[in-house]
Image (spheres, rainbow, N blue to C red):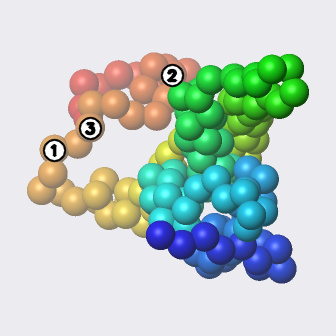
Amino acid sequence: MTWTYDPTNLGTGTAAERLDAVRFLTGDTNTLDQQVQDEEIAFALEQNGNNIYGTAAWVAKGIAAKFARLVDVELDGQLSESYSQLQKHYGDLASELDYQAKSISGGLGFAAGGLSKATMNTVEDNTDRFGSRIRRDQFSFLDTEYTGEY
């Protein structure tokens, strides 16, 4: 497993830039306090269509889950470790990053394409094809009379 971060390599153009951007967004930039491995971020990027905000939210949820497994500890009032605060922090961060991911991508979570006008015209001009019974303005009878033909 590997852990890398280069603050001069932030972007969305390459896999390495996206990885560093996700680290930046989640705050996992301290080599002495590593939270997730490069391979985990690469997997999350693949699952989220290379959307860095969606991936960062995923990673933050994973980090929050890691801290949720741990209990707060206090030793004789001298030393304490509050994992619940870390879990809450990463949970809140994940929510904010989810919001940013939806704002940037339009909130659909997928991309939809369509047919070109040329393809539609070619299909409509094909005389060996049954035509659609649905037409634009099919219920507009302003100056035309219904002939029963499609």
**Left/right of residue 96 with respect to residue 119 in the rendered view:** right
Of residues 119 and 67, the one drawn nearer to the viewer in this rendering: 67
Q: Secondary structure at mark 3?
A: loop
Q: Which mark is residue 132?
A: 3
Q: If the image is split into quadrants, where does the C terminus sit?
A: top left
Q: Residue at x 62, y 23 (%)?
A: 71
Which mark's residue is nearer the viewer, 3 or 2?
3
Front residue (pair 27, 101): 27
Identify the element where label 2 is drawn. loop
Q: CA distance from mark 3 to mark 1?
A: 7 Å
The quarter holding residue 122 reads bottom left
Q: Are marks 3 and 2 in contact (CB under 8 Å)?
A: no
Q: CA distance from mark 2 to mark 1?
A: 22 Å
| Front-lying residue, 144 or 124 | 124
Identified by mark 3, the residue type is Ser
The answer to whether residue 25 shows anywhere in this view is no
Image point 26% across, 37% down: which residue?
A: 132
* Amino acid type, label 2: Ser
| SS of the residue under disc 1 | loop
**Mark 1 nearby-residue class (10 Å; few <14, some 14–19, many ≥20):** few
Could you tell me which residue is drawn at 45 percent across and 52 percent down?
Answer: 47
Residue behind mark 1? 130
Res. 57 image quadrant = top right
Among numbered discs 2 and 1, the one appearing first in the sequence: 1
Which residue occupies the extreme right position in the image?
78
Q: Disc number at residue 140?
A: 2
Residue 97 location (% of width, % of height) = 73, 40
Image vertical order of residue 112 relative to residue 125, above or below:
above
